[in-house]
Amino acid sequence: MSVCDVNSPLVGSPGLQVSPEGSPVFHEPWAAEAFAMTVHLHEQGVFTWSEWAANLSREVHRPGREVDGSDYFDCWVAALCALLVEKGVADPETIDSLQHSWQRAAEATPHGKPIELANDPLR
């Protein structure tokens, strides 16, 4: 688990786990990366705070989500993908293709080595 020191309104995202000092806490490196990408895109004006909050809330409250919140960052990524499509930054096919490519790269990467997109055997 790691803590990130960031000054962004996204720290106030519904359900985001924070340390006693108020900094976001991440259980996996990919969750911290998803958070960082979201903060960066928000700071670049790709979407507003209210757009982000509405999209994340919609994902968190979808039927079938984990009651214990263990899929929170899955919701986070789904909300980010939806916003990227809505804003015309990416199309669903590209996002889907990249998700599959990263999965293949993860499966092809030896244990203990960094997962890189170049490790996808189909790339």
Image (tube, rainbow, N blue to C red):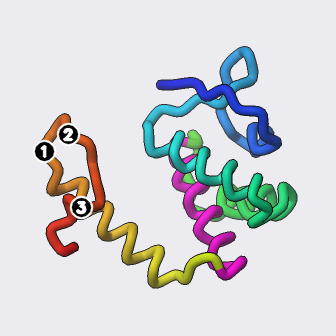
- Dominant secondary structure (helix, strand or loop) of the stretch shown in magenta: helix
Where 118 sits versus 95, above or below?
above
Measured as percent of width and height from the top left, residue 98 is found at 39, 70
- Residue topped by disc 2: 113
Say what amino acid the circle numbered 1 marks. Answer: Pro
- Residue type at the position of mark 3: Ala
Task: Measure the alpha-carbon separation of dots 2 and 3.
Answer: 13 Å
2 vs 3, front mark:
3
Specify start and end residues of the magenta stretch as a single range: 70-88
Gap in angstroms between the C-alphas marked 3 and 1: 13 Å
Instruction: Name which residue type carries label 2.
Output: Lys
Kind of element beneath mark 2:
loop
User: Percent position (x, y) of residue 53?
Assistant: 79, 56
Q: Which mark is residue 110?
A: 1
Q: Seen from this angle, which residue lies furthest right?
A: 50
Q: Which mark is residue 118?
A: 3
Task: Using the numbered discs, state the Cα–Cα distance from disc 2 to disc 1 in whole angstroms.
Answer: 6 Å
Quadrant hosting residue 63: bottom right
Label 3 crowd (10 A; few <14 / some 14-19 / many >=20): few
Residues under numbered marks 2 and 1 in contact, where contact means CB atoms less than 8 Å apart: yes
The secondary element bearing badge 3 is classed as helix
First along the sequence among labels 2 and 3:
2
